[in-house]
Amino acid sequence: MINQDQQKRLEAQQSSGARTVRPQQGQALKELADRHRVLACFLDLIKMDTQADESVKAAPSSAGQLQLGAEIMQQLRQQAAALKQEIKLWRTADGVVCLQLPATSGCESAAHLALLAHLDTAPDCSGAGVRAQLVKDYPGGPILLQSGLILDEAICPELYDHVGDDIIVTDGTTLLGADDKAGCAVLMELVQRALEGQFAHGPLSFVFTVDEEIGRSADLVPLVDLGADFGVTIDGCEAGELDVATFNASACEVTVKGLSIHTGSACGRLINAIKLAADFVSQLPADEAPETTQGREGFYHVCRLSGGVEQAVISLILRDFEQEGLAEREDFIRSLCERLNAKYAAKAAGSADGAGAERFVPEFHAQYRNLSAVLQAHPAVLELCRQAYASAGVPVREHYVRGGTDGSNLSYKGLPCPNIFTGALNCHGPYECLPVGSLLKSLQCTQALIELTARAPRTAVLLGSDAAALDWVAGEH
């Protein structure tokens, strides 16, 4: 059903001459998938629910990720057997699926490239029972999803860059799962093409990670076993984007201690942790929140507030592109807690709960770091990516991600790792969509990177900060 606000938006767009677009089901999508093997693979992968669950401490955090990993392994074995090729395929105890292919003849000295995509989908929205639908030759205008939700420029400003494209959408009741099953489909297709001998390549690793959406995946990748020289994640973002920098990130939990007294005798004694927490939130900079910042501006974000009168917990994430900026944000939180502890000290002094002046107690957890510094120390890696985009005919836009990628932590673990787009838009919710042309461009760019890496000596990539080596990679060979 369309709610009142959506109806008003729809009527306003129709009055301006915009025609409402209704997605197609069934045969039209099947016919398109029959023409593009990578799309058929993607549509198969999204049938399985792999939603990550932050409340589960085991890895992976959901059974669906194990089930999809097992399905992918079975398909990879079948591909190799059908082509009479030998592969090295295994799954770690944490559910990470890894496949390695040796270099083709003449490419043994090439750098070892790892390609990574994640199996899980975001906990923000259900990924169960995904019903993908097709907008054929998108003519522009609002897209009316089957549930009544309206996907338009107000929701997705990039949408009108895809007029004339075929676009995969949801029915409006689940996310699509293009983040990151589109990346997984790209990896599956590239394995198939490599086994078919469609291109020469150096040593390759294909890694299907778990629990990326809850920030655990990088710790689970078996880097020593892989032995790769550099990597690339295939995940999210608009066509043409090459992610070369991310936020520095930390999480913070502020425990707020109150004192619960029966309301009949609470006067002068009760200390309401909820009201103290509200005071804390009100003193965060209003112009430094996700909804009030853009570009390279950092922020404070209150993402959860739980508890009651006796105790409340404020969960925040802190983001800044500069490491010094992140440290300053953590210092601000500490200072705010100290000020509020002093403010409520008089009331705390007379309490009988033993909390004393420590009503606000912050605890910080490092999440990830800006990968930019690592990539700047390995310029040959980025140059290979730029050349790959050029070879695929895709204009490159080097992008500062207002978030993180697996590459953020992998880069600091010794695997320089930028990110190549999949083309997915509006991830993590029912408005998620995937322009098919963008998915195909992602595949082309990633294959071009494999082919270019096959011609780049390992020393040229590893010693990329050396001017001569960088010239070699950037030159014509």
Image (spheres, rainbow, N blue to C red):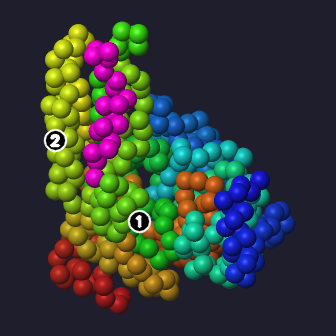
Local SS, label 2: helix
Amino acid tagged 2: Ser
Image spot of residue 46 (x, y percent): 66, 53
Instruction: Tally the marks.
Output: 2
Q: Residue 402: within the magenta?
A: no
Nearer to us in this view, 103 or 248: 248
Q: Which mark is residue 419?
A: 1
Kindly identify the residue that appears in the image at 17 percent across and 81 percent down.
467
Viewed as shown, does residue 338 lie left or right of 225? left
- Give the residue furthest to the bottom: 476
- Tell me the residue that label 2 is attached to: 335
Local SS, label 1: strand
Image spot of residue 88 (x, y percent): 50, 52
Nearer to us in this view, 50 or 319: 319
Image spot of residue 11 (x, y percent): 73, 70
Kindly identify the residue that appears in the image at 18 percent across and 32 percent down.
343
Q: Around disc 2, counting alpha carbons within 10 Å, would you say few (fewer than 14), some (14 to 19), or many (20 or more)?
A: few
Q: Residue 29 falls in which quadrant of the image?
A: bottom right
Kindly identify the residue that appears in the image at 66 percent across and 50 percent down.
174
Q: Residue 374 falls in which quadrant of the image?
A: bottom left
- Please provide the residue range marked out in magenta: 267-285
Amino acid tagged 1: Asn
